[in-house]
């Protein structure tokens, strides 16, 4: 009996370990995708001659996508990426 319970516990542990590893891998892929999207959009805004409104719309579209990817992390997005977009747009368009 004891051996069977231990085997079941080990099996559950290994199963949970692999599930957790898969969740972490998925989260890492989503973070990487978001970083690429942010970096690409920032480069596009910085290097192209687009109107202010278009730059703001692109920044808003990135935020919308980020919230789809990470529904409960809007505040975190604002802290990390929102400030980068605001700084870029302020510098490029001479806003104060």
Image: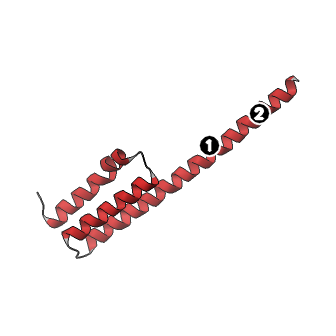
- Name the residue: 30% across, 66% down: 58
Secondary element type, mark 1: helix
Q: Position of residue 46 (x, y in %)?
A: 26, 69
Q: Position of residue 27 (x, y in %)?
A: 52, 50
Reading the image, the residue beneath label 1 is 20
- Name the residue: 86% across, 27% down: 3
Q: Quadrant of residue 14?
A: top right
In the displayed structure image, the side of residue 24 where residue 16 appears, left or right: right
Where does the N terminus fall, quadrant-wise?
A: top right
Q: How is the image coloured?
A: secondary structure
In the displayed structure image, the side of residue 3 where residue 90 appears, left or right: left
Q: Which residue is at the front of the view, 89 or 66?
A: 66
Farthest residue to the right: give it: 1
Q: Quadrant of residue 54?
A: bottom left
Reading the image, the residue beneath label 2 is 10
Pointer 2 or 1: first along the chain = 2
- Name the residue: 40% across, 46% down: 73
Secondary element type, mark 2: helix
Q: Position of residue 18 (x, y in %)?
A: 68, 44
- In the image, residue 2 sits, relative to residue 57, either above or below, namely above
Q: Badge 2, how many Cα within 10 Å: few under 14, some, many 20+?
A: few
Tell me whether the residue at label 2 lies in contact with that at label 1, contact meaning CB atoms closer than 8 angstroms.
no
- In the image, residue 7 sits, relative to residue 89, either above or below, namely above
- Name the residue: 33% across, 45% down: 75
In the displayed structure image, the side of residue 89 where residue 9 appears, left or right: right
Gap between marks 2 and 1, in whole Å? 15 Å
Q: Badge 1, how many Cα within 10 Å: few under 14, some, many 20+?
A: few
Q: Position of residue 16 (x, y in %)?
A: 67, 39
């Amino acid at each position: 009996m004891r051996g069977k319970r231990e085997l079941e516990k080990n099996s559950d542990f290994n199963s949970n370990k692999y599930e957790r590893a898969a969740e972490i891998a998925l989260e890492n892929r989503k973070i990487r995708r978001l970083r690429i999207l942010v970096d690409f959009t920032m480069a596009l805004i910085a290097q192209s001659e687009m109107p202010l409104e278009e730059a703001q719309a692109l920044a808003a579209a990135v935020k919308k996508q980020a919230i789809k990817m990470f529904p409960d992390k809007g505040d975190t997005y604002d802290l990390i990426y929102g400030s980068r977009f605001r700084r870029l747009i302020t510098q490029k368009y001479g806003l104060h």
